[in-house]
Amino acid sequence: MSRRPPQLSAPRLVAGLVVPLAAYTVIRLLLGSATGALAITEGVTALWLIAVAIVRRRVDPVAVLSTATVAIALLVYALTGGDPLALKMRRGAVTGTLGVAALASVALGRPFLILVVERVAKLKPDRQHEIEAKLADPRQRRGLTALSALIGATFALDGATQIALALTVPTGRFVADSTAARIAVLGTGVVLITSVLRRHTRARG
């Protein structure tokens, strides 16, 4: 438990938040349309995720979910004659789904981080005994459960916030406002998760 939880690394957060905002701003200036800029930005995001998956030759479940929601949002956008609501809702659909799934795993007594560690143990036969021994420690399991719940709560709150903004904020302001809200929610989540990891590390020491 010494590493930052998956999908919450600083470079990934920066890339996922700042780059789309910058791209949207430039495209909007060129097109003069907030809705058109949002549609293009979402489409480019999907293409980027696909390209990364091809280059790495690895399927990332989060990237698959994100790409699928982009495709659905763009389809709805086209079928509704340019209604931006589906594009705006997409932002909350990904993190909201992940958050609910993570919280559900905790509620069902199978925290997703424990499942991840168990999977890693199976993929590394040379370290399987060591990893399983650590996982058998009740403190380790409590720590992983707490982190699973915290990550789930962070993503669920982000999803709810994004959906609320999608329903209430005009398209022209949505990208900037939703990015600011996402930075606040995910940034707070990262700080809390890092704090939990540090306390757990000190307790083990």
Image (spheres, rainbow, N blue to C red):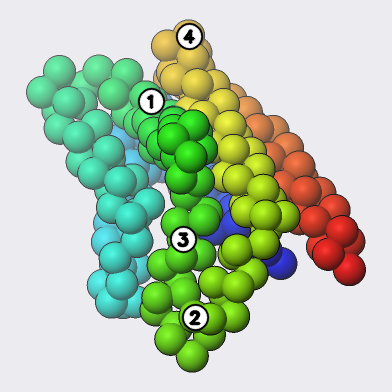
Q: Earlier in the sequence, mark 1 or mark 4?
A: 1
Q: Earlier in the sequence, mark 2 or mark 1?
A: 1
Asked whether disc 2 touches disc 1, contact meaning CB atoms under 8 Å apart, the reply is no
For image coordinates 48% across by 9% down, the residue present is 168
Which corner quadrant of the image does residue 69 belong to?
top left
Q: Earlier in the sequence, mark 2 or mark 4?
A: 2
Q: Going by the picture, which residue comes out furthest to the bottom? A: 126
Determine the secondary structure under disc 3.
helix
Question: What is the x, y in percent for residue 81?
Answer: 15, 19
The residue nearer to you, when weighing 16 against 194, is 194
The residue nearer to you, when weighing 159 against 198, is 198
Q: Amino acid at mark 3?
A: Val
Determine the secondary structure under disc 4.
helix
Question: What is the x, y in percent for residue 42?
Answer: 34, 42
Mark 1 burial class by Cα count in 10 Å: few <14, some 14-19, many 20+: many
Mark 2 burial class by Cα count in 10 Å: few <14, some 14-19, many 20+: some
Mark 1, residue position: 88
Tag nearer the camera, 3 or 4: 3
Q: Which mark is residue 128?
A: 2
Q: Earlier in the sequence, mark 1 or mark 3?
A: 1
Q: Eyeballing the image, is 182 above or below 49? A: above
Q: Amino acid at mark 4?
A: Thr
Question: What is the x, y in percent for residue 131?
Answer: 57, 75
Q: Amino acid at mark 2?
A: Gln
Mark 3, residue position: 116
For image coordinates 23% across by 44% down, the residue present is 68
Q: Quick check: 87 left or right of 154?
A: left
